[in-house]
Amino acid sequence: MIESYNDYLVYLESDRVSLGRTKALRTLIFDDVWKFQRLLRKYEFLNNCKKNPVLKFITSIRLRKLESKLGFSIPPNVFGPGLAIAHAGTIVVNPNTSVGANCRIHVCVNIGTQAGKGDEAPTIGDNCYIGPGAKLFGAIKLGDNIAIGANAVVNKSFTKGNITIGGIPAKEISQKSSDGLFVKGFHTE
């Protein structure tokens, strides 16, 4: 969670590296996904550090507008540093979810609660790859270095880590970890 200006800068740089974005002006202006991630981190900083309420309000409006345009429903303070949203498209995340550092997430992903249990959302470790169309729900825990296959339905915990899971319902399908599936912008060791 961003708790200082230094944390804010670390999160921004980690996200930029994970996304593979340059510091070029063209990227800053025209890349909507990177613009969204920068606004999300700015809002987290302003909210968590109780900074300028007017700027926080303006940032929240800009963030909501861009969320609607891109199809995202991603609340603040859910993802650790090194978030990489692959591209625009529907992504829905419950505010009670907790995701560690270096998460790459694709379109049509839903991370939520089990029906009737509004506060029991997934806890996901570091270095997680979430494939397109994956659905994760309930009070589940996923270990570090897990790759989740496309269209997987994850409704139970996989705390072991360093595996690939997939299927409906999800089960371990490989001993391969998420290594090599994305760039890690934040070093957890």
Image (cartoon, rainbow, N blue to C red):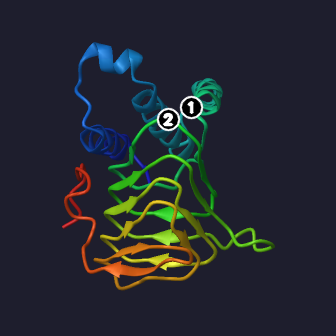
Helix, strand, or loop for circle 2?
loop
Q: Is residue 174 left or right of residue 172?
A: left
Q: Residue at x 33, y 73 (%)?
A: 144
Assess whether mark 2 and mark 1 are in contact (beta carbons under 8 angstroms).
Answer: yes
Q: Position of residue 12 (x, y in %)?
A: 33, 39
Which quarter of the rendered picture does the N terminus lie within? bottom left
Helix, strand, or loop for circle 1?
helix
Q: Amino acid at mark 2?
A: Ala
- From the image, tell me which residue sits under label 2: 88
* Location of residue 113 with respect to 19 vertically, above or below: below
Q: Quadrant of residue 131?
A: bottom left
Q: Position of residue 88 (x, y in %)?
A: 49, 35
Q: Is residue 45 left or right of residue 182?
A: right
Residue at the far right in the pictured view: 116
* Location of residue 176 with respect to 74 vertically, above or below: below
Q: Position of residue 15 (x, y in %)?
A: 33, 42
Which quarter of the rendered picture does the C terminus lie within? bottom left
Q: Amino acid at mark 1?
A: Leu
Q: Position of residue 11 (x, y in %)?
A: 34, 45
Neighbours of disc 1 within 10 Å: few (<14), some (14-19), many (20+): some
Neighbours of disc 2 within 10 Å: few (<14), some (14-19), many (20+): some
Q: How far is mark 1 from mark 2, CA to CA?
A: 5 Å
- From the image, tell me which residue sits under label 1: 70
Labels 1 and 2: the sequence-earlier one? 1
Count how many numbered circles sit on residues in the image: 2
Q: Quadrant of residue 165?
A: bottom left
* Label at residue 16: none
Q: Quadrant of residue 142?
A: bottom left
